[in-house]
Image (tube, coloured by chain):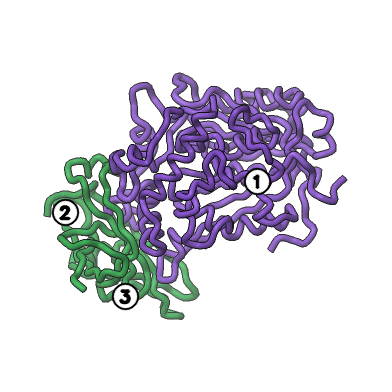
Amino acid sequence: MTAFGPPIESDAATAPFFAAAARDELVLPRCASCGGWYPPEVTICCGALEWAAAAGHGILVTWAVVHTAPHPAFASLLPFRTALVELAEGPWLQVRLVGPGEPAAGCPVRITFAHPAEGASYPVGTLEGP
Amino acid sequence: MTRQGLAMDAAIVGLGMTEVGRVYGRSAPDFAADAVRRAVADAGLVLADVDGLLVSSGTTRDVDVSLQRRLGLRDLRLLSEMQSFGATAGAMLGYAAAAVTSGLAEVVACVFADSPRQPGESAGAAYAARRRFALTGAPALRTVAGGNPTVQYALAARRHMEAYGTTSEQFGAVAVAQRRWAALNPLAEMREPLTLGQHQASRWIAEPLHLLDCCLVSNGGAAVVVTRADRAADLAQPPVHVLGVGQGHPGHPAARGSGFGLTTGAATSGPDALRMAGIRIEDVDIAELYDCYTYTVVVTLEDYGFCGKGEGGSFVAEGRTAPGGPLPVNTGGGQLSGYYMWGMTPLTEAVIQARGRGGTRQVPKHDVVLVSGNGGVLDHHSTVILSPHPREGRR
């Protein structure tokens, strides 16, 4: 896939997330004690958080069409859509929307993965028909 | 819950603003020192009277506690740098009011300054140049998804539109109403008339936000001086009493059930401040609302209860907030058309209106002025309620 935006990398806390993304798998932090699911940035709950396989789909909460490059590496690719997706497990994930389809709140979204030549793989979203 | 009977015994007695806007070649600390000097002089005080200093930075992040030495202030009893972004000015005022009420300090200056703009550079470029991009770990996911503060506000605005049927034209009505106010304000940067058609024709920044849904970016500084209400009576300006303050930091989770885009901290900081002031929202004569984007005004009007949830767009489109309307909002043009001094924009205009010094834009009835501050992406909120009169039952 062609580069889209700046290259990013994992850190110690998110290494399993990005390693899973490289395998086209979505994992999320899940609490070993209460079973609660969290977005990737959350690191604390009542018990230990473990990375667990997520279903990889959700619904569209909201979206925006980006016309001014938020980072110089997006400049040649404008406009594009970004979205907040509510995953089936409950956490939200912000992803770039790829592929066709008119967005509306509640649209089903499938999570796929971008594998840029440089930097870590990361999730993107595809609108699915109703 | 605000404690029953808690009240502030504090008034804003000095207001200082530097030249604001496309003013080049001065650092933010320089603007900050200038603003404090002006505010102290405006109050009829001297710098040696100041025993408390609260400072806050904008995008350049370089106004800090070293401002004390730049101003030559000795033996301060209160000194701190504060940061809750657009909510800071209102929050600082709350801390200053609490400090003088409790006796922690006598005369507290609160200042904000920023200097992001360079000659020949657009507002967006000036703002973006100051940002650092997260490229590592979980925060990098937002970067690579194309997020930035404006994009996150676009996401919030779109969620409001989807939930309540709010329209871009209604956002445009905010911009048009505020431009009408700005036309009456000699301090405002954008004073030429604006039509809804021009708003709609302005380019997209992040759809649903047009260029004219976005605030300005300005260089400059603003400060206020706060002291006890009894001391205020002897000073140079008519006192502006602090009747109530509140903060609200909703901490919306990024997960199912989140109120992101739908409700803000105004929903809690507003009632707290009103309770402290001993008034109801219906008693507010003028609202100075934080307006990083037009949408922010719409959602804030709702959260304060000036209208029902989801009715903010039509409330503004009916002309209620424009000159001549029943609820004057952002009477100096706000950050969309006036100047971008973060939370100092609504606060400075509120002081001007409460003093009755608004010139041709002065609202005749200005007994209660509500000020909102909003920071982060709707993460932080402050409310301040000001009046030319002391709280009922005090003196």
Q: In the rendering, which numbered label is found on residue A116?
A: 2
Q: How many marks?
A: 3
Where residue B117 sits in the image (x, y, percent)? 41, 28
Q: Residues within 10 Å of mark 3 (few under 14, many from 20)?
A: some
Q: Is residue B376 above or below residue B61?
A: below
Q: Which residue type carries mark 3? A: Ala
- Which residue lies at the image location 46% right of the left edge and 67% below the top edge? A44
**Disc 3, disc 2: CB below 8 Å?**
no
Camera-nearest residue between A37 and B238: B238
Callout in the foreground (3, 2):
3
The spot of residue A9 in percent (x, y) is 27, 53
The quarter of the picture where the C terminus of chain B appears is: top right
Q: Mark 2 or mark 3, which is nearer the start of the sequence?
A: 3
Say which element carries label 3.
Answer: loop
Cα separation between marks 3 and 2: 26 Å
Residue lying farthest to the top in this orientation: B25
Q: Is residue B28 visible?
A: no
Q: Secondary structure at mark 2?
A: loop
Mark 3 → mark 1, Cα distance in angstroms: 46 Å
Tell me what hue chain A is rendered in.
Answer: green
Residue beneath disc 3: A88
Whether labels 2 and 1 share one chain: no
